[in-house]
Image (cartoon, rainbow, N blue to C red):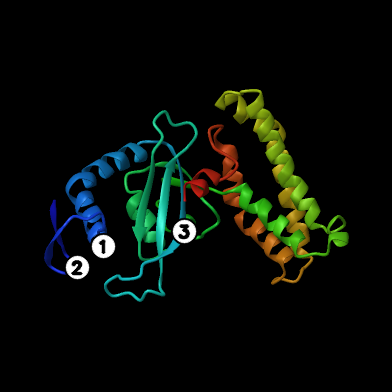
Amino acid sequence: MRWHCRCTGRNRNFSGSVCRQTMANWVIATHERWFEDFFQRLRSELLSNEILHADETTLTVLREDGRKATQKSYVWVYQTSGDSERPVVLYDYQPSRTGEHAKAFLTGFSGFLHTDGYEAYHCKLPPDITAVGCWAHMRRKFTDTLKTLPKDAREKHPAQTGLRYCNKLFELEAGYTEKRLSFQERFQARKEYSFPIAEEFFAWAKNEYDRNPVPKSAYGAALTYAVKQKEWLMHVFLDGRLELSNNRAERAE
C-alpha cells in the first residue's frame, strides 16, 4: 500500500509508521468532508433543549498561525441536561475565553444555561438565556479555605458555617433524588425546604462580608463569591429540572 506524505511531499510504502502531521491532516480532512454537517445537526439538536450546561478549559496548541505556542487556547463544552431525552455533548475550539464565543455558539438557544461564576456568561449572553450558578463551586470556596488552615483551627473557623449550609442543600437534593420526585415535586420541595436555607446562607454571608474580612484571603474570596454570585446561584429554584451544580459539563471536559 502506498500513500502520500505531506510532510516530505513523497510517496511512501506503508510500513505501519505514519508521521504525526500526516495523521493530523487526515483527521482534519475527514472532519471537513464528512463530519461538519453531522456536527451542525448535533448542534441544532442541542440548542433545541431548554436547559444546557457550559464550561471551558485551557489547552496549548504548539503550531497555530499567528499565535505563540505559549498562548492559551480554549475548548468550550456544551451539554444537554439531565432532563434531555437525547443527550448531546459538543466541543468548540476557540483561541480565547471571550464570551462572544459562547454567544455565537448558542445563537438560537433560549432557556437555562448552567455555568460557573465566569462573568462572560452573565453579561455577554442575550436576555432570553438565564445563567444558573453552580453550588459546587460555592461549596469548594469554603473547602479550599479550610484546607489553608491548621487542622486544629478548622472546626472553629466560620468557613465551617458556610460549608454546612452548602452541604445541607446537597443533602436535600440527594433526598429528592432518592425519593424519585418528579420535576414539579422537586420544585415544590425546594421551595419549602431548600430555598429558606439558601436565603439564610446569603444573609449570613452578607453579614460576614460586611465585617470586612481580609479581602485577599481565601475566606474573604469565598464570601465575595457568595455575595456577588447570589443572583445566579438562586436561579436554581426557578425550575425543578435545574441542577444544583454544573458538574455535568466539568466531567465532560
Task: Choose between 198 and 49: the one closer to the eye.
Answer: 49
Nearer the observer: mark 3 or 1; the answer is 1
Which amino acid, by three-letter code, is at mark 3? Thr
Which amino acid, by three-letter code, is at mark 2? Cys
Q: Where does label 1 land, which residue?
A: 19
Q: Where does label 2 land, which residue?
A: 7
In the image, residue 54 lies at what x, y percent? 46, 49
Task: Choose between 36 and 112: the one closer to the eye.
Answer: 36
Q: CA distance from mark 3 to mark 2?
A: 30 Å
Which amino acid, by three-letter code, is at mark 1? Cys
Assign a secondary structure to mark 1: loop
Q: In this rendering, would 229 be left or right of 212?
A: left
Q: Where does label 3 land, which residue?
A: 57
In the image, residue 169 lies at what x, y percent? 70, 40
Pointer 1 with pointer 2, Cβ within 8 A: yes
In the rendered structure, which disc, 1 or 2, sits on the residue that comes first in sequence?
2
Residue at screen point 42% across, 63% down = 59
- Crowd band around label 3 with a 10 angstrom C-alpha radius: few (<14), some (14–19), many (20+): some
Residue at screen point 26% across, 62% down = 19
Residue at screen point 78% across, 57% down = 159
Nearer the observer: mark 3 or 2; the answer is 2
